[in-house]
Amino acid sequence: MTEAPEFAFIARHFRSLAGPGALGLADDAAILAPPPGRELVLSADTIVSGVHFLPDDPAETVGVKLLGVNLSDLAAMGATPLGYLLAVSVPGTLPDDWFAGFARGLAGMQARYGLTLLGGDTTATPGPLTLSLTILGHAAPGAALRRNGARPGDGIWVTGTIGDATLGLACLTEGLADPTGHLVERYRRPSPRLGMALHGIAHAAIDVSDGLVQDLGHLCRQSGVSARIAAALVPASDAARAAGAAFLDRRLTGGDDYELLLAVPPDRVPALLDTAGAARIAVTRIGVFSDGADGVTVTGADGAPMRFARAGWSHF
């Protein structure tokens, strides 16, 4: 009997990505047992062509981004990756070989971060290419980080550098110079900050997906605290600094960084530096949490509060 086109498509592009629990992608669901004594941590994200990535972005980088943004959610919870489910809505105008590149991007991320495909769904759509991923991870019971634990006096720490991805988008759509290609690479290929043992170190965490100022505001609201950061302390790459002061607002409010914001008490800073050093992840203190419900204050070089047209990316 001839295999249905949908199943032939799955076999061509995704069967090689499947792990044991996926049952060869031949059944209606996967069977998976979490590691003994661990809790499951789950998250889901959808990316849409023309909204979350450019239609002419290389297919491989779209695979990297889709899995990367979900892995970043696990990193923010202090969880370890386990596997993922993938749902693909394919427009008829997209050539089949696009998915070969897309699957290469997924395969590279799987090998780097130690997880496999468990299953999912495929469907046709008259609209743009839409890719949804549900990721599964695990953590020790009670050890997953939350957004609601920041306390007055905690330092505000951030991993990596901020603003590269939004400037990378400006390079692709507005002609901003990027002689080294660093900014575009950061936009297309997020690096989720997995590998730090943050339980018992950070009181709270969130990943910077919608913009530093906006995501810090989410953490403040959930924790019932205020935050004050200095723009001059926010870490920037050489490529971002070369873009100039005119792009400072965009660096602070643009999305797609996929760095971590952490609330860390002063007495746990040595432990933070140790675990970040072991994972080879740079961390920088940019401010402090305090009492009150004043939200986020960002001070400029003159010490005065900065004003922003918008705090970050809106999903609606």
Image (tube, rainbow, N blue to C red):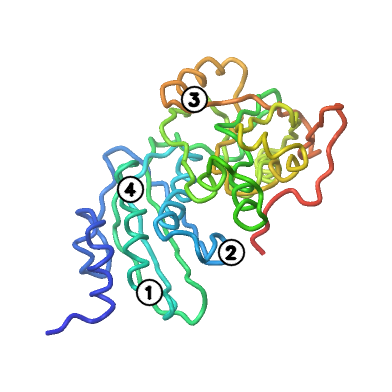
- Relative to 9, say whether 277 is above or below: above
* Residue annotated with mark 4: 108
Q: Looking at the rendering, in which quadrant would you find the N terminus? A: bottom left
Q: Secondary structure at mark 4?
A: helix
Quick one: label 4 or label 3, which is nearer the N terminus? 4
Q: Nearer the viewer, mark 3 or mark 1?
A: 1
Q: Is residue 243 left or right of residue 182?
A: right
* Residue annotated with mark 2: 51
Residue at (51, 40) in percent of width and height? 76
* Three-letter amino acid code of the residue under disc 2: Val
* Three-letter amino acid code of the residue under disc 4: Gly
* Three-letter amino acid code of the residue under disc 3: Gly
Q: Residues within 10 Å of mark 2 (few under 14, many from 20)?
A: few
- Near-viewer residue (121 or 251): 251
* Residue annotated with mark 3: 200
* Residue 266 sits in quarter: top right
Using the numbered discs, state the Cα–Cα distance from disc 2 to disc 3 in whole angstroms: 37 Å
